[in-house]
Amino acid sequence: MSNLTAQDWSESAINVLRVKEQNCAETDLFCIGYLIPQVELLEVELIDKQASADWWQQQFIEFVRGNMSADKMQADDERTIEQLMADL
């Protein structure tokens, strides 16, 4: 598998989230809206990095989990976000 740049990974992840946004339950909109800027923030943080899709996924999960903790996210939202991240 070839390595992805931060931009390639970010564009792919945002495209998946945008499709989900169009078809999701209204209750999931907040969580999708939370994740999209998280993707963009990680891209900026690691702009010069090239890595596998699996590496990007792991970095994203760790990044979002840290931010959810700092944001004191509600448990229901955390579960929804975890599921959404698993689908990326």
Image (cartoon, grey):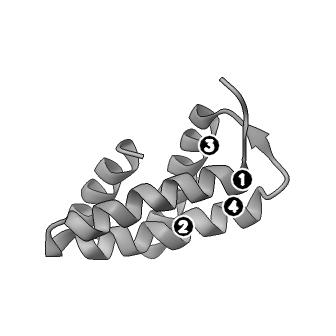
**Do the numbered discs 1 and 3 sit on residues whose CB atoms are within 8 Å?**
yes
Q: Secondary structure at mark 1?
A: helix
**Residue toward you, 78 or 27:** 27
Going by the numbered disc 3, the residue's amino acid type is Trp
Between disc 4 and disc 1, whose residue precedes? 1
What label sits on residue 56 in the rendered view?
Answer: 3
Q: Position of residue 11 (x, y in %)?
A: 58, 58
Between disc 3 and disc 2, whose residue precedes? 2
CA gap, disc 3 and disc 4 = 10 Å
Q: Is 26 situated left or right of 72 in this image?
A: left
Q: Is 40 situated left or right of 74 in this image?
A: right
Report the residue marked by disc 1: 6
Report the residue marked by disc 2: 38
Going by the numbered disc 4, the residue's amino acid type is Glu
Q: Secondary structure at mark 4?
A: helix
The quarter of the picture where residue 38 lies is bottom right
- Quick one: label 2, few (<14), some, or many (20+) residues within 10 Å? some
CA gap, disc 3 and disc 2 = 13 Å
Q: Position of residue 58 (x, y in %)?
A: 56, 40
Q: Secondary structure at mark 3?
A: helix
- Above or below residue 16? Residue 30 is below
User: Can the viewer see residue 18?
Assistant: yes
Q: Is 14 situated left or right of 32 in this image?
A: right
Report the residue marked by disc 4: 43
Q: Secondary structure at mark 2?
A: helix
Q: Position of residue 84 (x, y in %)?
A: 33, 53
